[in-house]
Each structure stands twice: as C-alpha cells, then as structure tokens.
Image (cartoon, helix red, strand yellow):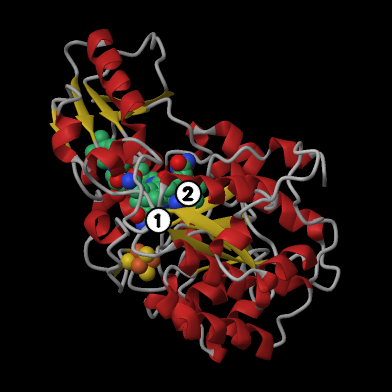
Amino acid sequence: MKILLVEPGYYTQYPPLGLLKLSTLYKMQGHEVRFVRGLELVTRFVPDEIQVTSLFTWAWKPVWEAVAFYRALFPKAKVSLGGIYATLMPDHARESGAHEVVTGLIKDAEDLMPDYEMVPAWHRDRAASIVFTTRGCIRKCDFCAVPMLEGKPFQIRNTGRIGHLIHPDHKRVIFWDNNILGEKHWPDVFEELRELDLEADFNQGLDARLVTEEVAHELKRVRIPTIRFSYDFIQMRNSMERAILNLRHVGLKGHRMGHVVCYVLYNHRDTPDDLFTRVRDLLAWGVAAYPMRYQPLTGDYALNKDSYVGPNWTAEELEMVAVARRVIGFGGAFPAYEGLVKKFEKARNFEEAFGLRARKDKEQSAAPKRVKPATHGFELKEFAWDLIHMGRDHQHPTHALAGNI
Ligand code: B12
Ligand code: SF4
C-alpha cells in the first residue's frame, strides 16, 4: 500500500515525531511511504491512504486545510487524522472532512526508531534523537492533557534500555517523557546515557517532588546542560526548595545552578500575587523562572491560543506578564540576574514586580540592567542561547535579544 504522511503547515521547531515513528512501522510492514509538510503538490506518488498528524489544539486551521487539500488532490485515498488535537478534540476534528479520526497512541509504533531520514535538516543540523521512554504520568494535574492523551503511565519497554531509540549519528537526546522520575527505570536510562556519553535534555521538566539527594546525585553525573523543573502551584514550594537544596548538597553549584530553569504555570487557579511569589522564590534560590501561560485543553478557548483569561486574572495583568518577559526577561525567562533578584526582593506584590515604570522621557521602561549575572560567572552564552530557543518555541519575540549576547 502507498501511504502519504502529512504534517500540516503549523509552526513547529521539532520534527513530527509521531509520523516519523509511523513511517518506520509502515516501512517494516512493507508499505511505501512518502512524507510532506504543508500543502505540497505531490507528483509520481498516488497514495491509497493519507495520514495527517496534528499538534496544539489552537493550530487546527492548518490541519483542516491539509485535510481538504489532500482530499481534493487524491479523491480516492482514505484520509485519517490523528495526533494531539485529534485526540483532545475529536468531535471538532471530525468536522475537518477526514474520513477517520484516530485518537491516542499507536502502541506498535512507540518503541521504534523514528525515521529521521524523512527530516534531513533536523537529522543533519540538530542531530538530536527525540525519545519517549515512558508515556502518561503518575500524577493527574487538572491543567495537563497528558492523562487524556496517554492514559495510565507505562514504560515503553520493560527494561530501561533506550539505545535502540537513539540514532547512531546523534550525540544529543531530547526526552519528551512527561515524568521520567515517576517510573522505576530512570536509573538505567541515566546509566545508559553515561555509557553512550550522550548529552540529555529532559525537555518537559523533571518532577521536583521526586528529586531526593540520590536523584540529585544521579543528575549531577549526566551531561544535562539545562536542568528543567516546574513550579506549577504554590503548594509545591517546600518540595521545590528541597529539590534545589539537594542539587546544591551534591555539589551542583556555580554555573550549573545558573542553568536550572523552572517553568511556572500561571493563569490557571493561581492569582497574580501567587505568580509573583513563585518567581521571587526561584530567583532567590538562584534559578531561572520561565512563566508559562495556561491554555485550556478542550472547548472554544483551546482553539484560540491566549484567548483564555483565568478566574483570578485580567487581560491587563496577563499583558503585564507578557511585556515584563519581553522587556526585563531574557528569551521569555527571568534568570537570576542580580538586578532581577533585587527587583523581586524589593517588590511587595505583583504590580510592583511586573509593572514597568515609564522613565521620565516615557520612551523606555525602567528595566533593571541585565548584564551582570548573579550566578558566579557561569557561561552565560550557552544558557542564553537555550533560553532564546525556548523563547522562539514559545513564540515570544526574542530576536531583539539575540544581538545582546
Ligand atoms: C514537545 C512538546 C512541546 C514543544 C514543542 C513541540 C513541537 N512539536 O513543536 C515545546 C517545549 C516548545 C512545547 C511548548 C508548549 N506546549 Co507542549 N508539548 C510537547 C509534548 C511533550 C509533545 C508534543 C509533540 O510534538 N508530540 C508529537 C506527537 C504528535 O506525536 P506522538 O504523540 O508521539 O504521536 C503518537 C500519536 O499521537 C499517534 N499519531 C500522531 N499523529 C498521527 C496521525 C495519524 C493519522 C494516526 C493514525 C496516529 C497519529 O501516533 C504516534 C505514535 O503513538 C506534549 C505532551 C505530550 N506528552 O504529548 C506537550 C503539549 C502538546 N504542549 C502543551 C502546551 C500547553 C504547550 C505550551 C502552551 C506551554 C506554555 N504555556 O508555554 C507551549 C506552546 C508552544 C507553541 N508553539 O504554541 C499541551 C497542549 C495543550 C493543547 N491545548 O494543545 C501538551 C499536550 C502538554 C500538556 N501537558 O498538556 N511543547
Ligand atoms: S506532573 Fe506534569 S505531566 Fe504529570 S500530570 Fe502533572 S503537569 Fe502533567
């Protein structure tokens, strides 16, 4: 059978992992596969099936366009639609005109090496393997889609071996596990990273509540340029602080502490002052805070990014956060620069921390100087690039900062 795999033309920095794994699966089953992105006039290939993937719910329009375009191009082919938007909002996805909407994971594809040959630019330039060693999560936070998308937590393999998911040409591994420390195989994964001498990015953040001294010790022994956590709600305060203290106890300090970044959810059940407290905590503990605006998972608001305003927030307050991230932040984050630490220390509330006073000439805000990091002279450049990439991923205009590094 001939299968056309389609990634709609939405913004993304990463290759379509689901389709890359499906490509491997279909090739193993003896099918002929072609991959396209966006709307492309496919020649010399007449598919029997067209499989369209999807990502964020708010990126639904390019998905509908792709379905309509390829249906018109190949009227005899069956069009299936799967992926994240299709799983979170299947009824809406059905209106796209796809013959079939497939929800959830294709388990047979989960333990396969993605077909990186389909995305040569990524394969050559970024040279990183993207891996899920687990799906699901031991927790069930109500702002998170993972339980809906992936169901009960499970390990992709019973053993912690991951070598077969890492392309031999890649020296970096990006983990998309939602909560790798929640599964018992993580020490084996860390061991293999060391054996293979690979650099790792636990991209979705590690669960601070699980960072005991033993875990901190193991983290120190793996090459992780940026250690990511999330401080999603104020009740996590003690465990968050303990995780950071544990990292310090095992000797992670200086530049490596400066490379700890913590996602901070806001616009959910929290209040602006609560966001302020969490950012202030993180800066005081010497790590970077990366505010992340809550986006609904289903319903009308989920179809339109940044349309939702939480019950304790106003549109103006949300705008204040966005502006502060651009003006006094770096790549959308607040690193523990001396000026920022002091600003948050002095502020008594959200308004004082995030409200940017206009200068007398009213042309520029009184942003603290961000040239001097408070973090013992760590290699700012590498970390700054990481933040800039994160900023791009999260669609904050960071180009203006690039020249400052
Ligand atoms: C990696 C990731 C990111 C990356 C970007 C990803 C990218 N590709 O560009 C980064 C870190 C930048 C990111 C950012 C954000 N993210 Co994010 N992210 C993820 C993550 C971990 C994986 C997404 C992904 O690319 N998956 C690849 C998918 C499509 O492949 P797959 O799932 O392996 O595919 C399987 C099945 O889906 C199926 N399949 C897939 N396609 C098809 C097609 C057919 C035909 C069939 C049959 C089957 C099929 O088969 C595959 C094999 O099993 C998910 C969480 C998760 N566990 O999924 C959150 C997730 C998508 N992110 C989410 C959110 C909220 C965000 C942010 C808004 C966070 C914030 N507040 O800043 C930002 C928004 C950025 C933006 N550009 O707008 C939410 C989405 C909510 C929503 N309403 O859509 C998720 C679900 C996380 C969550 N915990 O709730 N994210
Ligand atoms: S711990 Fe993280 S991945 Fe797990 S349910 Fe909560 S937000 Fe989602």
Which part of the image, by quadrant, shows the N terminus?
top left
Query: Is the residue at mark 1 in contact range of ligand 1, meaning its CB lies under 8 Å from it?
Result: no
Say whether residue 135 is left or right of residue 382: left
Residue type, mark 2 in image? Leu
Q: Position of residue 375 (x, y in %)?
A: 79, 71
- Can you tell which mark lies on residue 318? 2
- Can you tell which mark lies on residue 237? none
Q: Earlier in the sequence, mark 2 or mark 1?
A: 1
Residue type, mark 1 in image? Asn
- Is residue 154 shown to the viewer in this render? yes
Q: Position of residue 144 (x, y in %)?
A: 32, 59
Which residue is at the far front? 360
Above or below residue 38? Residue 213 is: below
Q: Nearer the viewer, residue 305 or 343?
A: 343
Above or below residue 375? Residue 52 is: above
Q: Where is residue 254, by image quadrant?
A: bottom right
At a point 39% along the width and 53% down the height, the residue shown is 294
